[in-house]
Amino acid sequence: MKNILTNYVNTFKGLSKEVWWLSLITLVNRAGTMVIPFLSLYLNKNLGFSLANVGWILSFWGLGSVLGTWLGGKLTDKIGYYKVMFSSLLISGIFFILLQTLSTFESFCLGILLTMLAADAFRPAMFVALNAYSKPENKTRSVTLIRLAINLGFSAGPAIGGIIITGIGYYALFWVDGITCILASLVLVFVLHPKKVKELDNVIVEKPVSVYKDKAFWIFFIGMFIFGFTFMQYFSTMPLYYKDIRNLSEFEIGLLMGFNGFFIFVFEMPLIHWLENLKKDKIKLVALGLFLVSLSFVILLTTSWIGVLFVGILLMTIGEMIAFPFSNAFAMERGKKGNQGEYMAMYAISFSLASIFSHNSGMQMISFIGYELTWLFMTVFAFLGVAILMALKHFVLKKEQPTI
């Protein structure tokens, strides 16, 4: 038992203190994300919007995310990641609080667009900061630590969110989300101000390669779009499936979603450390992660046993544990050829763009063809993504082997 604990602790060694502080800021920020898994329920059950309207609102969420991520990448390359991260956290915190005052379809579309524009400018800036604060040999584990912070906050968030909804009401979620974003901006000022920290691996390229001319990256982008499209169903249509078809309460949904974050917090770092030591190809590992996500959908069609929900979310969780860190590390490696903010922005935009179509398409599909056919579509679409990633593997080996 002692050896197991020692080996677990050793997987965290060698990471810089700046990465640990960035992880703490991310944890504080993500502790309020309890509103996200309940947003579709809030719009449908509390505000009375139809599933079709909920889908359109979530598309504006995705559009704001795309615009915010693109703008964040541009600003990061021009004014630096620190200013972008601080502004994003502060402004999005204020906007999250104001969202609770909106009640019409049009106002919520505009409100969620502006909120996500401000919030997701943080993402490329955070990735560039993470790259700068990490030693080259620790990039993937640094990404994993950030994800642990995200999922630690997210594991507690849905469970607490369910309790808050039951005891107080949905409006309290917006207050918590907004306040935690504002608190995160204050922590950033005190611990990661440029005068207080040093960069370990800030790569400046004199003649940067534009991300728009990187063919391998764009094949990768398509694969990540498909991964994001299927994965994000767990944060929009899946909670509705749990409630409408499986008859779970908000509290039970929160616990089930919370398991995702808890499992990642406990097992992801040892898993990534083990996979890194195996020296497996990053793209193959991302494809494996997407394959496991596809299985999490198809397994729901096999039985009415309630335990299959746990098996499904376990498969999805392991899939994202593998896919996210190694896809992020691949994007960082490509980014060293050009402007890092631009590359990391496009990596994040692949998920933001997916959210534009994913939530809306999922809502429309369950409305017109039902949950079972929707899950079958997600399975087939994910298989397509696996095939594209394997094609990328062969493309990179053939054309650009020295860069890997």
Image: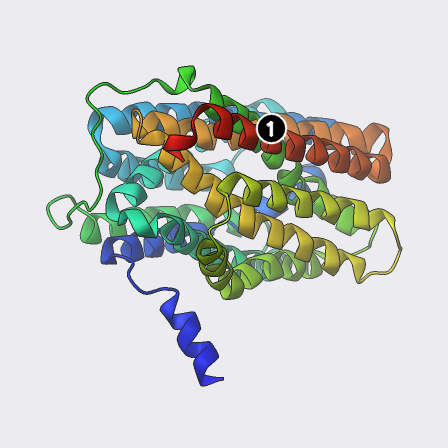
In the image shown, does 44 or 310 lie closer to the viewer? 310
The amino acid pointed to by label 1 is Ala
- Confirm whether residue 61 shows in the render: no
Image coordinates of residue 56 in percent, x first then y, are: 65, 25
Color encoding of the figure: rainbow
The image quadrant of residue 166 is bottom right
Image coordinates of residue 283 in percent, x first then y, are: 53, 39
Give the residue displayed 73% in from the left and 60% down from the top: 310
User: From the viewer's perspective, is residue 350 above or below residue 44?
Assistant: above
- Confirm whether residue 14 shows in the render: yes
Which residue is identified by label 1? 391
State the SS at label 1: helix
Give the residue displayed 86% in from the left and 60% down from the top: 305
Question: How many tags in the picture?
Answer: 1
Q: Is residue 302 left or right of residue 36?
A: right
Considering every residue shown, the one lying at the far bottom of the view is 2
Work out which quarter of the rendered image holds the C terminus and state it.
Answer: top left
Considering every residue shown, the one lying at the far top of the view is 213
In the image shown, does 197 or 135 lie closer to the viewer? 135
User: From the viewer's perspective, is residue 339 above or below residue 85?
Assistant: above
Give the residue displayed 23% in from the left and 18% down from the top: 207
In the image shown, does 83 or 9 lie closer to the viewer? 9
Give the residue displayed 47% in from the left and 47% down from the top: 325
User: From the viewer's perspective, is residue 41 above or below residue 273?
Assistant: above
The image quadrant of residue 365 is top right
The image quadrant of residue 43 is top right
